[in-house]
Amino acid sequence: MPGGAMVAAIDGVGHGAAAATAAGIVASIVSRSDDHDVQSLMTRCHEELRGTRGAAITLAWLSFSACTMTWVALGDVEGRLLPAQRGEHRDRALRLPGGVAGHDQPTLAPETVEIHRGDVIVLATDGVDGIFADALELVGAAHEIAERIIDAHWSGTDDGLAIVLRWLLDGEQRAA
């Protein structure tokens, strides 16, 4: 997408083909969309999932020019923004309102936060213990951090997904 990137973490409810179908519907909608409004995109996903098992979804729009992230969740896909220098900025946790896309959609409250060079963004499904960020070392490549999260915090009884991104743009690109 021009000007930024949309990131989605999707977890179809349950297991098997029905869960995969629900997740596939969301992935198709997000990948074909030019919309960077996370609230309208989430509403579209919710509507298209009616009649399916549904899904837990977190969407994050990363604005390259503003060095910001606008994110929203529906269901239990954890989102964390971890500063490159712990203590420099506070860790941010995405508000999880509950609900299931396709079944019950509470009032969504997208949040926009600044992102600084070196900050790490993590999205993780409910198969990953939510304490993963408490003592996470932000060293190494993003895929190495994701592997450490899964190795240490995957429940082993549910699907486990950890998406890790490291922000590499300087704040000097921020819009005035």
Image (cartoon, rainbow, N blue to C red):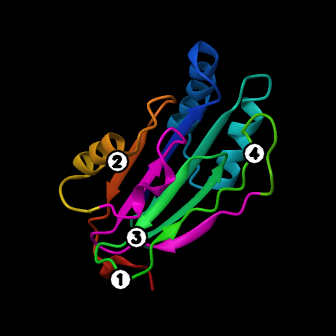
Question: In the drawing, does residue 168 fall left or right of residue 20?
Answer: left
Query: Which mark sits nearer the N-terminus, 4 or 1?
Result: 1
Range of magenta residues: 108-136
How much space separates mark 4 and mark 3, taking CA atoms? 32 Å
Name the front one of labels 4 and 2. Answer: 2
Residue 52: image x %, image y %? 74, 23
How much space separates mark 4 and mark 1, taking CA atoms? 33 Å
Dot 2: element: helix
Q: Are marks 3 and 1 in contact (CB under 8 Å)?
A: no
Residue 87 bears which disc, if any?
A: 1
Tag count in the figure?
4
Decide if residue 2 is in sight here. no
- Other residues around mark 3 within 10 Å, as few (<14) / some (14–19) / many (≥20): some
Residue 65 bears which disc, if any?
A: 3
The residue carrying mark 2 is 149
Label 1 sits on what residue type? Gly
Residue 106: image x %, image y %? 80, 52
Q: Residue shown at 35%/83% (left/top)? A: 87
How much space separates mark 2 and mark 3, taking CA atoms? 30 Å
Label 2 sits on what residue type? Ile
